[in-house]
């Protein structure tokens, strides 16, 4: 009596799933490599251009090694332009923006996550609507507001607008919603006030959200150009982006000096990202932002 051996579709299905997973991983790796090259090529070109002299850049703009390399453009840019003052201004403004944004947006996110009050749904809707509103649309109303408050030409005109950040409120609100409700109820039963629950229970837990908001706020504040250009009217009070834009002269562009100043401008952002990239990834993963 003969037996008929049936094929094993489960094994074939498993093998095809493994092949599909490998193909997907290779596709993701290829896309990641292409995006990395798209970002790295301008960076490498700016770095090599800053190490060359203007004569070789004009004659051979696409060559990376023509004319040799030197640090003359960096020393010239640092000695000629107030880059140190621009660095200090950007650092002070960015740090203050981070401190105030983390403090106020975390309190707003905590209130929307745990407190029940009249108009809570409308406030959440306004926060969500603020995510879709471009910052350029707020330039004129903010300029009129801060001019009436006599804050134009001060650091506060740059710090205060970044405090009311809907995306930061959304990040904290999403993270606070993920905290187990029994933990909050246990703290309330023990007699803790809402302020104590916020400061002693929730804030130590939401370190990933704090890191994410702090880093994104720092980068956004450091790269801001339009609003500081309108608000700050003194050269020594300018930030890095506004100061770098003032170096470009249509009649005589010093390519090496401009590129050297640009490299000096974005090096702090690269350092911040490389140091805190794990916190950024963890914060985005835990808050559920896509």
Image (tube, rainbow, N blue to C red):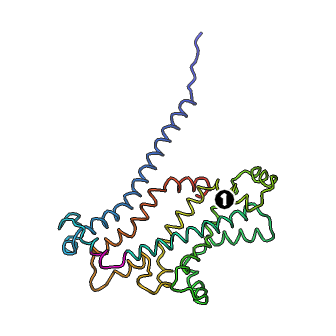
Instruction: Classify mark 1: residues with Cα within 10 Å, few (<14), some (14-19) or many (20+).
Output: many
What residue do we see at 28% from left, 80% from top? Answer: 253
What residue do we see at 28% from left, 69% from top? Answer: 50
Q: Nearer the viewer, residue 102 or 112?
A: 102
Look at mark 1 in the image and give the residue it sits on.
174
Q: Residue furthest left?
A: 67
The chief SS type of the magenta part is helix
In the image, which residues are magenta?
76-83
Q: Nearer the viewer, residue 24 or 173?
A: 173
Horizontal relation, residue 1 to residue 238: left or right:
right
What residue do we see at 76% from left, 52% from top? Answer: 181
Q: Is residue 125 magenta?
A: no
Horizontal relation, residue 227 to residue 40: left or right:
right
Horizontal relation, residue 46 to residue 100: left or right:
left
Would you identify the image quadrant in which residue 129 lies?
Answer: bottom right
Residue 265 sits above or below residue 173 on the image: below
Would you identify the image quadrant in which residue 200 lies?
Answer: bottom right
Q: In the rendering, at what x and y percent does residue 233 appear?
A: 46, 87
Horizontal relation, residue 107 to residue 154: left or right:
right
Label 1 SS: helix
Would you identify the image quadrant in which residue 108 lies?
Answer: bottom right
Q: Residue furthest top?
A: 1
Q: In the rendering, at what x and y percent does residue 221 appear?
A: 51, 71
Which quarter of the figure is the N terminus placed in?
top right
């Amino acid at each position: 009596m003969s037996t008929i051996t049936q094929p094993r579709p489960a094994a074939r299905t498993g093998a095809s799933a493994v092949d599909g997973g490998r193909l997907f991983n290779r596709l993701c790796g290829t896309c990641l490599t292409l995006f990395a090259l798209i970002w790295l090529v301008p960076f490498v070109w700016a770095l090599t251009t800053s190490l060359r002299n203007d004569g070789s850049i004009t004659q051979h703009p696409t060559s990376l090694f023509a004319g040799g390399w030197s640090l003359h453009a960096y020393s010239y840019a640092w000695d000629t332009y107030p880059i140190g003052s621009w660095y200090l201004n950007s650092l002070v403004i960015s740090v203050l923006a981070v401190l105030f944004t983390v403090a106020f947006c975390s309190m707003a996110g905590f209130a929307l996550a745990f407190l029940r009050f009249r108009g809570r749904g409308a406030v959440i809707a306004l926060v969500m609507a603020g995510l879709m509103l471009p910052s350029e649309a707020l330039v004129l109303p903010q300029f009129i507001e801060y001019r009436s408050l006599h804050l134009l030409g001060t650091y506060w005109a740059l710090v205060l607008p970044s405090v009311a950040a809907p995306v930061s409120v959304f990040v904290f609100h999403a993270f606070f919603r993920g905290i187990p409700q029994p933990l909050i109820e246990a703290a309330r039963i023990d007699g803790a006030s809402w302020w104590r629950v916020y400061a002693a229970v929730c804030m130590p837990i939401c370190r990933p959200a704090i890191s994410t908001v702090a880093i994104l706020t720092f980068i956004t504040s450091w790269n801001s150009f339009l609003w500081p250009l309108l608000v700050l009217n003194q050269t020594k009070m300018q930030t890095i982006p506004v100061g770098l834009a003032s170096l470009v002269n249509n009649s005589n562009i010093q390519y090496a000096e401009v590129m050297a100043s640009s490299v000096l401008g974005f090096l702090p952002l690269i350092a911040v990202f490389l140091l805190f990239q794990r916190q950024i990834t963890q914060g985005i993963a835990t808050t559920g932002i896509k």
